[in-house]
């Protein structure tokens, strides 16, 4: 049995072919469909789709997922879900009176091209009479116009003359499948979030407008058909929530039939009349045509790759894996929208109800900070635009200032349903302040500092002022009832990561007040009055910074994770864990919180984020102590351990952990990609391991440094980054790094 299981895993490693600019697969079986739909996900930052086949069957209304950035609706009072949108990809295909599911498919191949974002699927469908039809579909979501998409179907009879019936349109018959925050709970109850759906018939086109049942939030989708001069007899095919048309098309041996569907999508978030906008945009798409639109999106991707690409002298699989990680992260980022962020599963899956976590600021934002600062700024502007909600949230916890939620959607109110996480994993507030500080360090964006950052930093600092608890006997401040990044430690006291970043938050706020007074006195007076700021607040921040409890064992040169960690019961991970499947599938989550094991990086996470705060010896000591105790039961863990392993000179471990992070989804390392989708934070952790770990790049207010530590698999690297408004180019050959300033 064990040997057979190892054989299955070996086959999975071979399932995908990873090339420098694409990922492809020749296994079209139903057994691999969910996995392929996840890894072949597509997006453009405004909308995203799972990699399902446009002409495929729909068994359930939640299966063919399409999502729009920032489009949420309430599933119960106070709780939202990212709304599954109408399916604009759909084609329905009948070959000579036979449904596609009645045919046998051979010669299957699908490929996702990183250069234009197109997903191409090819196979031959054979019916019981031996008639063979070559089927090809191509879908892309435009990066040149994020409201636009194109879907092409091409049918070629190989050995017969006959007819095919093709139906094209937009299917509004979709539902949500809300997924519990508890990873061990599988929900089977669907939620119908759509109310009234209005269908719009047209000739070679049409569309629909759908309104959510509760908040009346609208989406409008419009399509146009291009049958390439076929002049087929298209007839309306409207039924319930389906807006479309069909044609019976005569086909001849060896002659291809091509039909393109060009789609425009607008929602209530885009303005007062999404229906009018979609109509006009669909007509513009028709004028440009499928090939023209695909050319435009390839040009847009080329510009993105000019800034974001990391070239490796390494095996093709590593190069392709790196580009896949960057590609997936870029295409799920709402880079031009300051009112939305990136969910833990991007725009291609409803896991965690589509919510935004610390994942965005800590794991994903660094890539954009160094390659597309405006996109990074917009991610932080989302937090600024939800600051008022965070202030109200803090009041709900009987505290001043601003308390950001562990899980956020289109508002800044808490969406997490578990007490210990939602109430106690409060480092999210300091994480956001840290990200604001890093953005200011790297960009020097004075306008953002003056207009947004100073207010965020002051309000979050106010939260920490009373979140710390004063102990008169020791004249120290403790941080009680907190849960750090290592979620297996339970609810504890003085988690080092949280205390350290909370203190950093206080320092940033102190410095922001001083700078506002000096450089922007008029704006400061307005902000001071609006926030009712008093000078003694800054003194309180200083007091807590100096007196906060941080455990350090001088004899061992070891920073201690929290007050209770070393009191927990020891556990040897090797005795229980044989693979990368999380141990909570074998041992109760509650029980794991009383073992001296880590779910993911905690102290090491802090050291990765604040590399100059710790000596090389302290980093090595922390690695030697915490790494053997870490179970890596979170997808966030591998990349950060690769980064830190590189920094402490453990190149073999760095390579091993990097490979797990790099191929986390492509090889289904944790056996959850099929049911949970792409892990967007892990994509960002992979990039950080590569650039901050292997390349050794670091940029802050002191300038730029680069101290490479390449693994044996990589002999050289080349990539660009931005710092203080200027572009730079890094070239690494072995241990030698050259950093060239290219100008603005």
Image (cartoon, rainbow, N blue to C red):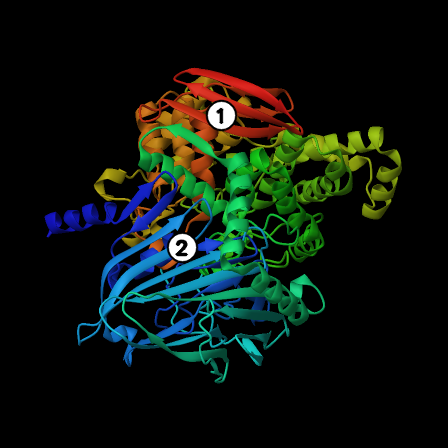
Residue placed most toward the observer, 530 or 541: 530
Residue placed most toward the observer, 143 or 162: 162
- Residue 160 appears at what percent x and percent y? 24, 72
Q: Is residue 730 visible?
A: yes
Residue hosting label 2? 119
Name the image quarter holding residue 286: bottom right
- Residue 724 appears at what percent x and percent y? 66, 28
Please identify the quadrant where the C terminus is shown: top right
Disc 2 to disc 1, C-alpha distance: 52 Å
Q: Is residue 205 above or below residue 183?
A: below
Q: Which mark is residue 10?
A: none
- Answer with left or right where residue 287 lies relative to residue 35: right
Other residues around mark 1 within 10 Å, as few (<14) / some (14–19) / many (≥20): some
Q: Which mark is residue 552?
A: 1
Q: Is residue 89 above or below residue 429?
A: below
Q: Is residue 134 above or below residue 313?
A: below
The residue positioned 82% from the left and 35% from the top of the image is 535
Element carrying mark 2: strand
Residue lying at the far top of the rendered structure = 736
């Amino acid at each position: 049995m064990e040997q057979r299981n190892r054989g299955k895993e070996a086959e999975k490693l071979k399932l995908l072919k990873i090339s420098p600019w694409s990922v492809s697969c020749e296994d079209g079986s139903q057994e691999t469909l969910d996995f392929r739909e996840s890894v072949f996900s597509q997006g453009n930052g405004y909308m995203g789709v799972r990699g399902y086949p446009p002409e495929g069957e729909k068994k359930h209304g939640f299966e063919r997922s399409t999502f729009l950035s920032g489009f949420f609706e309430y599933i119960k009072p106070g709780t939202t879900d990212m709304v599954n949108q109408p399916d604009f990809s759909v084609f329905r295909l009948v070959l000579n009176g036979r449904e596609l599911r009645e045919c046998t498919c051979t010669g299957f191949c699908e490929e996702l091209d990183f250069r234009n974002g197109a997903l191409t699927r090819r196979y031959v469908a054979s019916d019981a009479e031996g008639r063979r039809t070559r089927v090809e579909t191509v879908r892309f979501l435009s990066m040149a116009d994020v409201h636009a998409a194109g879907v092409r179907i091409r049918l070629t009879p190989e050995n017969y003359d006959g007819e095919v019936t093709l139906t094209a349109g937009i299917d509004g018959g979709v539902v949500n499948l809300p997924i519990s925050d508890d990873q061990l709970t599988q929900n089977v109850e669907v939620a119908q979030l759509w109310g009234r759906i209005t269908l719009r018939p047209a000739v070679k086109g049409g569309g629909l407008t759908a309104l959510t049942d509760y908040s009346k939030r609208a989406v409008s989708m419009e399509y146009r058909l291009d049958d390439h001069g076929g002049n087929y007899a298209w007839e309306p095919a409207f039924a319930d929530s389906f807006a479309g048309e069909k044609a019976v098309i005569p086909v001849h041996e060896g002659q291809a039939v091509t039909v393109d569907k060009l789609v425009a999508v607008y929602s209530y978030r885009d303005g007062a009349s999404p229906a009018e906008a979609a109509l006009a945009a669909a007509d513009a798409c028709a004028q440009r045509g499928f090939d023209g639109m695909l050319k435009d999106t390839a040009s847009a991707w080329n510009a993105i790759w000019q800034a974001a690409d990391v070239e490796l002298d390494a095996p093709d699989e590593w190069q392709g894996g790196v580009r896949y990680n960057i590609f997936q992260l870029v295409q799920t980022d709402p880079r031009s929208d300051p009112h939305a962020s990136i969910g833990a599963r991007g725009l291609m899956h409803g896991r965690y109800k589509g919510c935004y976590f610390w994942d965005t600021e800590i794991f994903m934002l660094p890539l954009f900070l160094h390659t597309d600062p405006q996109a990074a700024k917009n991610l932080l502007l989302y937090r600024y635009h939800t600051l008022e909600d965070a202030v109200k949230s803090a009041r709900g916890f009987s505290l001043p200032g601003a308390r950001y939620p562990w899980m956020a959607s289109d508002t800044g109110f808490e969406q997490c349903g578990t007490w210990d996480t939602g109430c106690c994993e409060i480092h999210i507030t300091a994480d956001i302040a840290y990200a604001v500080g890093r953005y200011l360090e790297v960009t020097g964006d004075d306008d953002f500092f003056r207009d947004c950052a100073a207010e965020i930093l002051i309000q979050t600092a106010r939260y920490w002022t009373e979140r710390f608890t004063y102990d008169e006997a020791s004249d120290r401040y403790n941080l009680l009832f907190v849960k750090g990044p290592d979620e297996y430690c339970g609810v504890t006291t003085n988690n080092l990561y949280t205390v350290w970043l909370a203190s950093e938050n206080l320092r940033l706020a102190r410095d922001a007040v001083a700078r506002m007074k000096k450089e922007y006195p008029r704006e400061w007076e307005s902000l001071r009055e609006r926030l009712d700021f008093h000078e003694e607040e800054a003194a309180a921040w200083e007091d807590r910074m100096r007196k906060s409890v941080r455990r350090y064992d001088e004899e061992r040169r070891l920073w201690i994770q929290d007050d209770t960690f070393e009191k927990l019961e020891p556990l040897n991970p090797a005795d229980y864990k044989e693979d990368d499947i999380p141990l909570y599938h074998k041992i109760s989550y509650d029980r794991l919180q009383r073992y001296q094991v880590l779910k993911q990086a905690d102290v090491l996470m802090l050291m990765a984020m604040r590399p100059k705060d710790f000596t090389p010896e302290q980093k090595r000591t922390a690695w030697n102590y915490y790494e053997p105790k870490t179970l890596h039961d979170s997808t966030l863990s591998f990349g950060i351990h690769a980064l830190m392993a590189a920094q402490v000179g453990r190149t073999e471990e760095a390579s091993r952990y990097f490979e797990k992070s790099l191929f986390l989804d492509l090889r289904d390392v944790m056996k959850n990609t099929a049911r949970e989708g792409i892990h967007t934070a892990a994509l960002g952790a992979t990039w950080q391991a590569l650039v901050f770990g292997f390349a050794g790049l670091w940029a802050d207010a002191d300038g730029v440094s680069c101290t490479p530590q390449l693994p044996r698999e990589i002999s050289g690297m080349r990539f660009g980054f931005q710092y203080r408004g200027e572009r730079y180019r890094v070239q690494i050959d072995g241990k030698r790094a050259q950093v060239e300033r290219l100008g603005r």
